[in-house]
Image: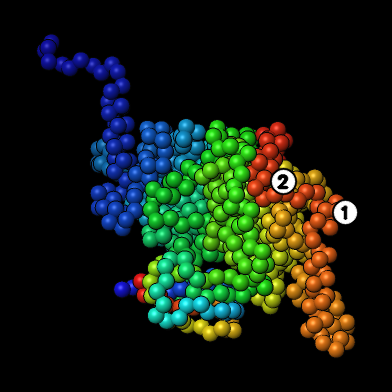
Amino acid sequence: MPDTIPNPVTDWQPELDELRRREAMAQEMGGPDKVRRQHDAGRLTVRERVAKLADPGSFHEIGAIAGRAEYDETANLRRLTPSNCVFGRATLGGRPVVLVGDDFTVRGGSADATIREKPLMAERMANEFRLPIIRIIEGSGGGGSVKTIETTGRANLPGGVGGTGLFNYTTLNLSAVPVVGLGLGSVAGLGAARLASTHYSVMTKETAAMFVAGPPVVARLGQNLDKKALGGWEIQTRSGAVDHAVDSEDEAFECARRFLSYLPASVHDLPPDLPCDDDPGRREDSLFSIVPRDRRRVYQMRRIIEAVVDRGSFFEQGRMFGRSLITGFARFGGRAVALMASDPYFYGGSWTADTCQKVVRFLDMAETFHLPVVYLVDCPGFMIGLEAERAATIRHGVRAMAAMNQTTMPWCSIIIRNAFGVAGAAHQPAGRLSLRYAWLSARWGSLPLEGGIEAAYRAEIEAAPDPAQKLREIEDLLNQLRSPFRTAETFWVEEIIDPRETRRLLCDFAQLAAPLRMPQPGRLQMRP
Amino acid sequence: MAEVKIAAEITASVWQIQARPGDQLAEGDTVMLLESMKMEIPVTAPQAGRIAAVLVAEGDQVEEGQAVALLEA
């Protein structure tokens, strides 16, 4: 017997080699040319995005070698084109999350190269393991394309038999875990839906656009628009479809990390407290004079926010939409809260229809994730005028009131200046006890005097020999009577405070609220 | 030298124009005051530059996003 017969294989090295070979092919994504095109367009590949977003070395991929294989005539693998969905677990700041991203280098992120179960499993993993999910979206996000009809030989019924899973989780997870969407290229169809159906969404300014259907489809309507004009950041952040826009993908990743730092991993958990080295009793002298005595003049509400929260802890959401109300997250004594504040630079702080939509979504999120609410109030009422009526401001307004009244989270309002009318009443939930403080500059009423006097005293003013003089006399009288101290005399307002006490009182509120938060799902089923 | 559009951020009436063509402004300087909901809302220079043109007059109604002045920066 010849002694050249190789030893028989006794271990699984050939299979391991095959596995590693397939994994290496998956790492190549759509190939060098497609990767170069991605880079030339100023965009990272999905694998580079995952590597930058996750804590170093923490990404554990699932299903890396799923894809379309080509074999030679002897059934040996010639090539593996990976699925254009990359997903797995990772940590962000040491906390576990699910990451799922579209690979635009493989068939432009379209359905043609998607294995349907991959993004579905990512969503399901987030839901059942109670982990935040970050959707990195580019392309149609797994949605169908016209070409699919040719490649599959049949037309796809959206939501047809066996095809509802991803649609289900796209919205279901909003009531279960924090959902972040990053739009980092052209995003359309289901991709756009998955970006909009989040608690927080970010897009890049120069390299991303979002639309239901892109320019070639819209051109059939006679609208010849490029991507940016149709769905660029200025369109989408002002419309409220996307929360924030940034200059680079790195900034988008940082936004995602920062947003999640205020939230629990799921509705079964509580928002994490952080150590705080900012004195809860810190008094900011600037607050004593920040509100002008001239009632027609505006002031910078963001300066008040920065002065009262733990230093550097404010993180704003949706700055370009519903701009008469600032919304975001902050910490008081290390405890996270949802913070709303009027912005008098926009319609004097009046609630527009857009503002009301912003209130609903923000309060639903606060309620879902057990965040106490702080509201810095300067609201002269709902927006008025013909355009406001055409926008159904009052119906959006009562919807916002309903969202407020349905919250169960502890609530604290600081009335900075105005609280007028029905929108002024919507400064705390009706029907339960909240904390409330009024600054020395506060004033309120059913209707502002300006215009309100003419309505209420019309006959008296018209009958006067000098109507303008009569109007001034009435205004002077009412101004004396509406001092907030007179309101406090009758206990219609509980406390009037020195503005410099605000931080101490809000830190006190956050401490009181902490044990009232319950780490369990609430009744609310949040909608996008 | 770039020409920068200064836009109204809100729908409002023009209350008081404070900057004239040729004026040199620093970032944040007030160009004009708009009036909305009985409040005076400043429109400010987004960056330093010289006012090239004021595109509206006091009393005009302006729409959100409408250019109200041009700045040479």
| Mark 2 and mark 1: Cα distance apart in space | 23 Å
Asked which secondary structure carries label 1, the reply is loop
Q: Compared with residue A374, is residue A12 higher up or lower down, i.e. above or below?
A: above
Residue situated in front as seen by the camera: A353 or B41: B41
- Taking the view exactly as shown, the residue that stands out farthest to the bottom is A465
The quadrant the C terminus of chain B occupies is: bottom left
Mark 2, chain letter?
A
Where in the figure is residue A484, as x and y percent of width and height?
79, 58
Q: Compared with residue A474, is residue A281 higher up or lower down, i.e. above or below?
A: above
Label 2: how many Cα within 10 Å (few below 14, some 14–19, many 20+): many
| Residue in the image at 48% along x and 46% along y | A256
Where in the figure is residue A333, as x and y percent of width and height?
60, 37
Residue situated in front as seen by the camera: A20 or A295: A295
Residue situated in front as seen by the camera: A428 or A443: A443
Residue tagged 2: A411
User: Looking at the rendering, which quadrant does residue A483 occupy?
Assistant: bottom right
Mark 1, chain letter?
A
Residue tagged 1: A490
